[in-house]
Image (cartoon, coloured by chain):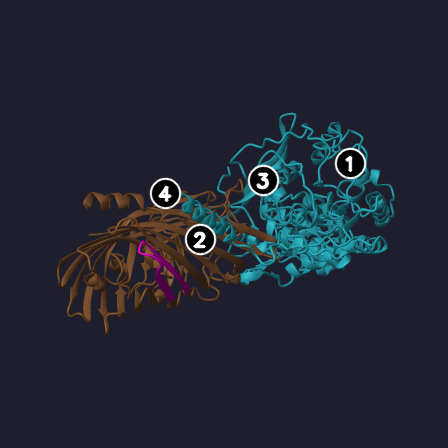
Amino acid sequence: MRKLLLLVLFVSVATVTYAGGYRVSVQGQRAIAMGHTGVGVVNSAELVFFNPAGLVYLENKLNVSVGVSGVFTDVLYQNTEFGVSSETDSSVGTPLNIYASYKVNDWMSLGLGVYTPYGSEVTWPTNWEGSHLVNEIELAAIYVQPVVSFKLSDHFSIGGGPIFVTGSVQFNRNANRTATDIEGNRSNIAIDDSGVTNWGWSVGAMFNPTEDLHIGFSYRSEIILESEDGEATFSNFPNTTRPGIPPNGTTSFNAELPLPAELTVGLSYECDKWLFAFDYNRQFWEVYESLDLTFGNGSSSINPRNYKNSSVYRFGVQYEATEKITLRAGYYRDETPVQPGFFAPETPRNDSDGFTGGLSFAVTPKLAIDASFFYLRFEEVDASYDAGSGGPFGGTYKSSAFAPGLGLTYKM
Amino acid sequence: MMRKNIKYLAILALGFVACEPEFDNPIEESGVYTNGEADFSTYVALGNSLTAGFADGALYITGQENSYPNIISQQFKSAGGGDFIQPLMADNTGGALLGGTQILDNRFVLAFDDKGAPIGPDIYTGAAPTTEISTNLGSSFNNMGIPGAKSFHLAAPEYGNVAGVQPGLANPYYVRFASSTTSTVIQDAVAQDPTFFSLWIGNNDILSYATSGGVGVDQNEVPNLDPSTYGSTDITNTTVFAGVYSQLLDALTANGAKGVVLSLPSVTSIPFFTTVPHAPLNPADESFGPQIPTLNATYAGLNLAFEALGVPERAIQFSTTSASAVVIKDESLTDITDGLALALAGTFGPLAPVVAAQFGQARQATANDLLVLTSSSVIGKLDTDRLAELMGLGLSQEQAGQFSVKGVSLPLEDQYVLIPAEQTAIENARNGFNATISALAAANGLAFYDAAADLAQAANGGIPLQGGEIVTSQFITGGGFSLDGVHPTPRAQAIIANGILDAVKKTYGANLPKVNPVDYGTVTLSNNIN
């Protein structure tokens, strides 16, 4: 298990951005197919993430779910007044998730999960119009979580566990709209840090009024990644002793990036071959007030974000078509935490609609292949970031994300 | 199973293609921007240093890239504009060589001392200049802006003859891309068969006179219609200007090309003339303050003579509490050397004629006099030539020294001061030139951008940009002028570009995207100086 974990940590470095801010909703193939619902769905080991309390109601002794999605994203930018347009480099992220649960006895189950709920990878053309805000960003946060689940009665269970996070960040932007060296090369700041760790926790509860109705609750704590050992590289700054202009070269930096808390309540109802699920997420983005970087060379970079708390409404349905095939579909409405005037091209996310689908194919009674996809559609939006150097940077943005995913579910 | 998989893969692939985002109205699609009645396929820009992208006292690559013609050519591309090729210099050092010998200075950069205080503009020495003037680049360039060119130079044969550079008969910048030793700029421009042109010429017809403090001749005073007889610092005759301008436009519009012309801004509102105050002599200055009693005692005798000769207004006195005006030579004053020599005979004895000659047309400057930027490096300095001269006339070194401090005891020469009469000559000529430009623009149906109005606003309150930024004519800090105090920064070039785009829209109905001036820089910092 330990080796596997290390392997997973090693492999799953790439992540992507979706959903409000840099929250990425790809934490289980079966859940993705159902609009990423799951707080009240007793279905697989994906519950380690969605609601650890539910694990104890899984029928089998051992449940394992692994999955990976290939996420294709595209962001377009244009500004009609200035006749400029840009498009992000179509990156393919491959977020991975792995979950296992083991029923110790009738009233207790243990579980372990590795997943990547936060991340972002956006690459604009170098020195594009908004390069004073971002050229390129890559955030990744890998959550590793052991959980325990207790059945208090057939109607009620609780669960939870600590979360270990290891994160990395790479960020590159130009110093401002105009600074260059004597040759006209844009002055640039790049930061790089990895292995930033911290701890958090999650708890969940499940209430089963009847055998067919599950009501779930889960809460995952806020985790602040504090970067202290990273390296910042200043390049192409003019050779000057003017105050406020840093020297070229590498230096240290300090920064804090919050991974916000998330509250989920929801339910599922089973009726014959059908299962209906609804989740409501409240994401506490308010903590992301500003991305402040303090550099070892005495300079600093203050980037107000001013996010607000946001909500996601998720709906999912599952139908057992045959003994071997189960079909799933879902929809969700994801509200952006970004407020007007703070729309930074580093996380260019406005309100979006997610359409999902997928199926499971039972190869044997123990092993199933899970396929999923989601298509996230963002409305075209006129937005700007007003707190940057030289005043507002705005225009029209349009983005989309598409992610097919594949996974395996094993139970014994 | 396999067939099923293929089917799903096909659906996935289809879905992927359909999921690519697309704007409702992509700006790349035709219809968003229009060329109106203009055809931007071959745009040629004619003009002088402003058009070439000259800044910081030199021509260099990034300045050329930020020239208004290059900026608007990028905007033209969204409505049928073609490539815009410039005769780029070899480096960002500026400066240039002729036969391996440097004949043009490197650019200015803004330097700071080790405490972070600004030292001021200084010559960049971080890299040697590499542009060799005699290397001809070929003659087909969209940017035909030639630093230093006056109106009539654009139609002057031999202006690009390398042999004429050293004697001052030809222009080193035109030499680089003249089609032959006898070609003219206008011929080389027309040979490219432009469909659209810009013409901004005439600034140097007054500017060279102004920056040299009016040492040249105003060729309007006694009308001289033969520009081949003009000195380099003369004001061009307005009739000559009108004739040349008309000739240039006739050549450019012969094939039906559309174009835009620009008015000439006031030269006296640029930092080159507004930065050094008329009263720069500070009593707190250790090299000046302690001398004030002695100076005033000496001048007291002179002032009595001024009074006796009926010119008491020429009295010279320095304040011990506030800044005093410099002493200048005003060549418009009646020369009273002879009378002064007599009047001073009692006080100065045999030296009286020498002192009299020095102050025959002297007075203290007033707020109406404009000191040129380059005067800041001479005011209060000892003129060693004058010192030697006076000692040769029999003065002791101490006496000679007392009469050799520039602007204090030795009146500043004509070249450092634009007196009101000179300013009037400049302004009259400018108004004449501008009347020609706007009249010929109207007569030829050309777009007209009143660049003069925008510069006036920069000099008087500033041009507001987004984000609270303001562009003014303040030297170094204003953002509008490069470190030579004459030529625009990239940011000002962007403002000019927007003004032209507005004019083109108004006249030809061409709807083109603007540029955002805050995306363009101002002055360049570097401590790579000697």
Horizontally, residue B147 falls left or right of residue B60, namely right
Of residues A56 and B217, the one drawn nearer to the viewer in this rendering: A56
| Residue B358 covered by magenta stretch | no
Is B8 left, or right, of A30 in this rendering? right
Q: What residue do we see at 65% from left, 45% from top?
A: B70
Can you tell which chain is drawn brown? A
- Name the residue tied to disc 4: A250
**Residues packed near mark 2 inside 10 Å, few (<14), some (14 to 19) or many (20 plus):** many
Q: Is residue A247 visible?
A: no
Q: Nearer the viewer, mark 1 or mark 2?
A: 2
**Foreground label between 2 and 4:** 2
Q: Which residue is mark 3?
A: B397
- Residue stretch in magenta: A314-332
Label number found at residue A402:
2
Q: Which mark is residue B70?
A: none
Q: Please identify which colour was used for chain B in the image.
A: cyan
Q: Amino acid at mark 3?
A: Gln
Give how far apart the Cα atoms at labels 1 and 2 are.
56 Å
Q: Residues within 10 Å of mark 3 (few under 14, many from 20)?
A: few
Residue A326 belongs to magenta span: yes
User: Is circle 2 on the same chain as circle 4?
Assistant: yes
Residue type, numbered disc 2:
Phe
Do marks 1 and 4 share a subunit? no
Identity of the residue furthest to the front in this view: A322
Q: Which mark is residue B188?
A: 1
Label 4 environment density (alpha carbons within 10 Å; few <14, some 14–19, many ≥20): some
Mark 4 vs mark 3: give the one in front: 4
Question: Where does the image place residue B340, in percent across and percent down from the top left?
Answer: 74, 51
Please, what is the three-letter code of the amino acid marked with disc 4? Thr
